[in-house]
Image: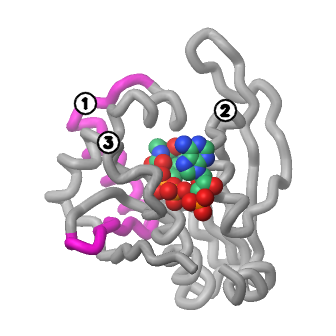
Amino acid sequence: MDTTKTFLRSFETSDIKSLHQWSNDTRAILMVGRTPLTYEEVVQEVEKKKKNNDLLLAIENEENKLIGWVFLKDIDYAHGRASIGILLSPKARGQGYGKTAMKQMIDLGFKQLRLNKIYLTTRGANEHAIALYKKIGFVVEGKLRQHAYVDGNYLDTYFMGILRSEWEELVKSL
Ligand SMILES: CC(C)(COP(=O)(O)OP(=O)(O)OC[C@H]1O[C@@H](n2cnc3c(N)ncnc32)[C@H](O)[C@@H]1OP(=O)(O)O)[C@@H](O)C(=O)NCCC(=O)NCCS
């Protein structure tokens, strides 16, 4: 049983400063895949997501300290699906927070937004993220070959997904 606690609350404009820092961490750049972003570019990214009606939530730890964000984007109610994304501050990684926050967001997506499927894409090189996603029930639905160019190499990208029916079964054992 997981003992790590996270709290999800709405992502505020004042949180963007922290998001800007986490986004420019070396590992985040390597794993999410882009060049460093200016503060204004991060503001624009958040605005774009809000306009798109994406669900953006801030992640807080047991001490109510902001440690990351998690979001559902491309929410398509007609087909009952959405894509999930997560980014933690470098200091908060590897302590179970990612797993707990993902489970909370998935639960929210299935139970409150009535989604039928939640999916994501991740670089094949992101072993940590893939381990987390598999642990909480995502399955690899496809491999996009040499889909991303990182540090001089073309890397595969994995498309992973979980269905509500699978989640309802898994949640009993998680
Ligand atoms: C990916 C990320 C969200 C994972 O969250 P996290 O809190 O660091 O991960 P957790 O501590 O919950 O670990 C989840 C599982 O990953 C695996 N894991 C943990 N650390 C790992 C490591 N260093 N390498 C490989 N796998 C690891 C374990 O299986 C772990 O489960 P367990 O603790 O039950 O054994 C977080 O590290 C992050 O924000 N990384 C940078 C951005 C990123 O890669 N985002 C995802 C883009 S698709």
Count the labels in the image: 3
Q: Is mark 2 within 8 Å of ligand 1?
A: no
Q: Residue at x 62, y 67 (%)?
A: 82
Structure colour scheme: one colour
Residue 24 in the image, given as x and y percentages of width and height: 33, 32
Q: Residues within 10 Å of mark 2 (few under 14, many from 20)?
A: some
Is 51 left or right of 13, judged from the image as shown? right
Q: Is mark 3 within 8 Å of ligand 1?
A: yes
- Which three-letter amino acid code belongs to the residue tagged 3? Trp
For numbered disc 2, what is the local secondary structure?
loop
Q: Is residue 32 above or below residue 56?
A: above
Is label 1 in contact with label 2 (beta carbons under 8 Å)?
no
- Which three-letter amino acid code belongs to the residue tagged 1? Thr
| Residue 54 found in image quarter | bottom left
Q: Is residue 172 above or below residue 126?
A: below
Q: Residues within 10 Å of mark 3 (few under 14, many from 20)?
A: many
Name the disc covering residue 22, or none.
3
Is label 3 in contact with label 1 (beta carbons under 8 Å)?
no
Residue picked out by circle 1: 38
N-terminal-most mark, 3 or 1: 3
